[in-house]
Image: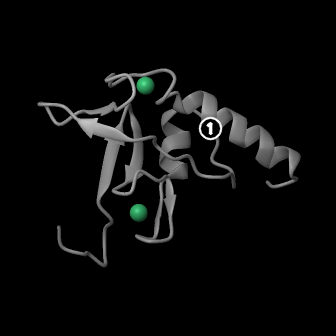
Amino acid sequence: MAETQTAPTTVEINDAIFCQHFKEVCSDCDYDGREENDAFFGLDPIDREGIEAPPATTNKEGIYQCKKHGSAACNQCFGWKKQITRLRTQAKKAGKK
Ligand SMILES: [Zn+2]
Ligand SMILES: [Zn+2]
């Protein structure tokens, strides 16, 4: 895959968007998908830590599924809303707005 300087390549895993490195916030490809993911889950975007996807592989249809359980909608590996909510709570406690 060729390096691109403009739009970073993104992947969708169980409805959340990550960069090609499975990160929500990535300095390598200058990507920040927090706002998009927060909006998707009906949350107001705030300055929180980014989430990271665990090891995943694509199935025949090109859908990402977790390596551990082989599920495309795994609540344990891909439980984004829970993870995001926890990080939001942490960010608020840390006094960020
Ligand atoms: Zn990246
Ligand atoms: Zn899993």
Q: Which residue is mark 1?
A: 84
As drawn, the residue found furthest toward the front would be 68
Q: Identify the residue shown where x is 48% and y is 47%.
A: 36
Location of ligand 1 given as a quarter of the image:
bottom left
Q: Relative to residue 92, is residue 1 drawn left or right? A: left
Work out which quarter of the rendered image holds the C terminus and state it.
bottom right
Q: Position of residue 5 (x, y in %)?
A: 31, 79
Work out which quarter of the rendered image holds the N terminus and state it.
bottom left
Residue type at mark 1 is Ile
Q: Position of residue 25 (x, y in %)?
A: 52, 58
Q: Identify the residue shown where x is 49% and y is 52%.
A: 24
The answer to which of 50 and 40 lies nearer the viewer is 50
Image quadrant of residue 55? top left
Q: Relative to residue 41, is residue 85 drawn left or right? A: right
As drawn, the residue found furthest toward the left would be 60
Q: Which element carries disc 1, helix, strand or loop?
A: helix
Reply above or below: 77 against 92.
above
Indicate yes or no: mark 1 CB to ligand 2 under 8 Å. Answer: no
How many numbered discs, if any?
1
Image quadrant of residue 44? top right
Reply above or below: 71 against 96.
above
Please tell me how crowded label 1 is: few (under 14), some (14-19), or many (20+) other residues with Cα within 10 Å. Answer: many
Image quadrant of residue 43? top right
Q: Identify the residue shown where x is 47% and y is 53%.
A: 23
